[in-house]
Image (tube, helix red, strand yellow):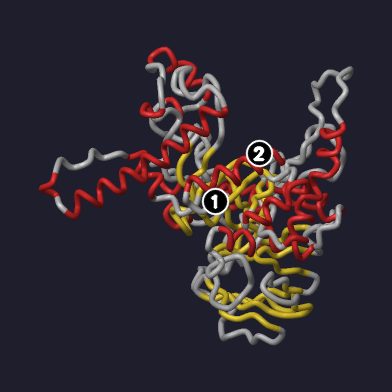
Amino acid sequence: MSLRSLALGVLALAQLPLLTAQSPGSPVLIKDARIVTAAGPVIDKGSVLIRNGLIADVGPSVQAPAGAWVIEGAGLTVYPGLIDALSSWGLPSAAPTAGPAGASAGARAQAQPAQPRSRGPEDRPQTSSWVRAADLVQASDRRLDTARSAGFTTAVTFPKDGIVAGHGAAINLGGATSGAMVLDASTGLYVAMRSGRGGGGGGFPSSLMGVMAYVRQLWMDAQWYKSALETYEKNPQAGPRPAYDRAAEGVLAARRVLLPASSRVEIARMITFSAALKTPVVLYGGHEAFRSVDLIKAANLPVIVNVKWPTKERDADPEFKDTYRTLETRDKAPSSPVELAKAGVPFAFTSDGLDSPADLVKAVKKSIDAGLKKEDAIAALTINAARIYSLDRRIGSIETGKIANLAVVKGDLFDASSKVEMVFIDGVKYAPAPEAPAPAGGAPGGGRRPGDAAENNDEVNR
């Protein structure tokens, strides 16, 4: 092998996304750092001990065991790994669900002529309630590296095609295999109130009222199916067995259902609608929670706030005059988390629709500027998200016995000058992805030198 081939091989290894410091079983001590536990007071100068993928100890005076790798934490802040509470990270862009609802928009358009017209709820239009994100997760998704670089260690990821899209999964954003990434294979069932030609060949449902009637009917069918199965099990000789219904099976397996609710009208509608489902509900959207916190508080429902704050569209007619309500929503949407926090409503954040994971943290900064306390912002990005999905015994805070998902940041997470130095996922260290090189003729200082990636890899794997 030539020296040139050997050098290229070394460089290729240096650029692998998995940049580990030691094996997960080796102890690691982050020493003398500021520790934001999210479960108690901030430790201004303390240490976190990681062993076997778990947080073995945390406190102001933790001793390094023999053979531990010690990271000097002066100037660093250790946070629980950030959690995106409603994501598609780790899933293929066109998840292979059944029928036209699971295909990409282009594939659905091509397949449309071959599909029979949907004439009613019995045709199960736009439903794939049996699909599980846990079965679709791909460890090779390049977005995972970008998310880790922004401090995220976990995502609750959902298929999103159709009306009843399928079951989400909580995944850690690291691991050699898809199976190693999955924390919880069934976090909830994603529902979108979509109507129009997208539904089963241009037939039912073609209106919002039709979509809501269809979803309600699907839940009623599932309850009937459950009752029929129970009756048959008690006395198989009494009659024919019920036919297997995978759509009903998927609904019955739902631990919770996610419903879209952004405006006050939608929030009120979904709160009323949720009572008919008899399944625990989480609202997502929440842009007008600042107008609706009274309704949400009374309903005792958690909210996943989409921080892609409403703005005027770039190609909007410059002559068109927006209503006062529209202008007020654009101005006050970032204050929705403020009002939810004041009311004691559990809420988390989603980056859905944003260009990059780092934009989520920047968008949360707008809420902080609007009055959201930093500790409430951190809670929404960590322990609140874990609690909403009943994962708080395992992730979401820096406590002994929990999974070692940590974000180590130079400075304060919400400062413009802060930098994610590393994250730990299941106790394994990941370094941020190399920055893209500056374009030719660009401003000096953008991007890294060609040798930086290899140097970074040597440092992490020393």
CA gap, disc 2 to disc 1? 14 Å
Mark 1 belongs to which amino acid?
Val
Q: Which of marks 2 and 1 is nearer the N terminus?
A: 2
Direction from residue 298 to residue 212 in the image, left or right: left
Q: Where is residue 92 in the image (x, y as percent from the top left)?
A: 50, 38
Q: Residue at x 67, y 61 (%)?
A: 422
According to the picture, the residue beneath numbered tag 1 turns out to be 281
Asked if 17 appears above or below 444 in the picture, the reply is below
SS label for mark 2: helix
Q: Which residue is drawn at 41% across and 16% down?
A: 117
Direction from residue 293 to residue 5 in the image, left or right: left
Count all numbered tags in the image, as a single digit: 2
Q: Is residue 11 visible?
A: no
Asked if 208 appears above or below 317 in the picture, the reply is below
Q: Where is residue 180 in the image (x, y as percent from the top left)?
A: 44, 57
Q: Which residue is drawn at 57% across and 62% down?
A: 425
Q: Give the crowd class for mark 1: few <14, some 14-19, many >=20 residues within 10 Å.
A: many
Asked if 163 appears above or below 187 in the picture, the reply is above
| Along the line of sight, the residue nearer the viewer: 22 or 322 | 322
According to the picture, the residue beneath numbered tag 2 turns out to be 266
In the drawing, what numbered circle is on residue 187? none
| Along the line of sight, the residue nearer the viewer: 63 or 34 | 34
Mark 2 belongs to which amino acid?
Glu
Direction from residue 370 to residue 45 in the image, left or right: left
